[in-house]
Image (spheres, rainbow, N blue to C red):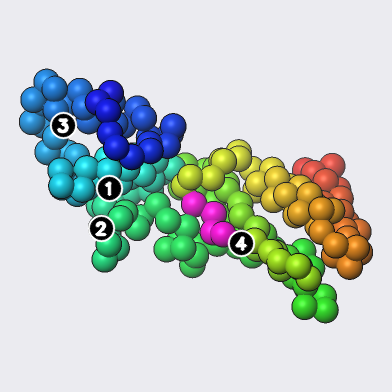
C-alpha cells in the first residue's frame, strides 16, 4: 500500500490496497467504480465511502450511493435508518433512562445500540451496518443489555440502584429463550 500522510483505520486497509492496485495496474473499470464515491482530490473520502457502501450491500440493502453535503456516504449511517428501528425501553426513572435500539438488516441479521442517560453522563448512538451483526433479535438485545449492565455498574451509587431493573430485563429475555420466543 502506498504511504499516506493520514491515519488509515485497520478496517479500511483492504479497500486502500484494492484502490492502489487499480491505480498501479491502470484498471479503468475498477477506478471508474471507485470514482462514483468521490474524486481523487478527496482520495480518503472516496475509498472509505467505497468500503462503507460495500458493507451496506453486504447487509442486504440495495440502492445507489447517497451522499451528504460534505460528500460522505449516507446510506450506511444508522441515523438514516431510524424509521426502521425498534425501541426497547429498559428504564426511565428520576431523569435517568436507558433503551436499546434494534435494527433488522435485510440479510436477516440484527444489530443494536444503546441510549443511556445517568446522573453523571451517558452515551448513545444508532445501530448501523458497522455494528456487530447477530443472527437473532434476542442475541442483539442481550448484547446491548450486557453493555447497559456494565455501564450502570461502573456509575455512581445513585446510578447503581438501577442495576436490578436492567438485570431483570436481561433475565426476561433469557426466560423468553427457554420457551423458544
- Please tell me in which quadrant of the rendered image residue 91 appears: bottom right
Residue plotted at (26% across, 66% down): 69
Crowding at dot 1, Cα within 10 Å, few <14 / some 14-19 / many 20+, comes out as: some
> Which secondary structure is most common in the magenta stretch?
loop
The numbered mark, 3 or 4, whose residue comes first in the sequence reads 3
Image coordinates for residue 146, horizontal then vertical, percent: 76, 47
Gap between marks 3 and 2, in whole Å? 20 Å
Q: Is 25 above or below relative to 76?
A: above
- Disc 2 to disc 1: CB gap under 8 Å: yes
Which residue lies under the disc numbered 4? 124
Pick the front one: 126 or 60: 126
Exactly how many numbered labels are in the figure?
4
The numbered mark, 4 or 1, whose residue comes first in the sequence reads 1
Residue 181 can be seen, yes or no = no
Pick the front one: 13 or 129: 13
Secondary structure found at label 3: helix
Which residue lies under the disc numbered 3? 30
Q: Is 31 above or below relative to 88?
A: above
The magenta span reads 124-128
Which residue lies under the disc numbered 1? 45
Labelled disc at residue 71:
2
Amino acid at each position: 500500500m502506498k504511504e499516506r500522510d493520514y491515519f488509515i483505520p485497520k478496517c479500511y486497509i483492504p479497500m486502500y490496497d484494492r484502490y492502489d492496485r487499480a491505480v498501479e495496474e491502470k484498471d479503468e473499470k475498477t477506478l471508474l467504480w471507485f470514482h462514483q464515491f468521490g474524486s481523487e482530490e478527496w482520495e480518503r473520502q472516496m475509498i472509505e465511502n467505497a468500503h462503507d457502501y460495500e458493507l451496506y450491500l453486504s447487509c442486504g440493502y440495495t440502492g445507489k450511493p447517497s451522499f451528504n453535503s460534505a460528500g460522505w456516504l449516507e446510506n450506511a449511517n444508522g441515523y438514516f435508518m431510524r424509521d426502521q428501528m425498534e425501541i426497547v425501553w429498559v428504564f426511565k426513572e428520576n431523569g435517568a433512562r436507558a433503551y436499546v435500539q434494534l435494527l433488522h438488516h435485510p440479510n436477516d441479521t440484527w444489530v443494536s445500540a444503546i441510549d443511556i442517560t445517568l446522573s453523571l453522563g451517558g452515551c448513545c448512538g444508532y445501530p448501523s451496518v458497522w455494528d456487530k451483526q447477530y443472527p437473532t433479535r434476542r442475541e442483539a438485545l442481550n448484547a446491548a443489555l450486557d453493555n447497559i449492565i456494565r455501564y450502570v455498574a461502573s456509575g455512581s451509587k445513585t446510578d447503581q440502584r438501577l442495576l436490578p431493573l436492567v438485570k431483570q430485563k436481561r433475565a426476561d429475555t433469557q426466560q423468553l429463550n427457554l420457551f423458544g420466543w
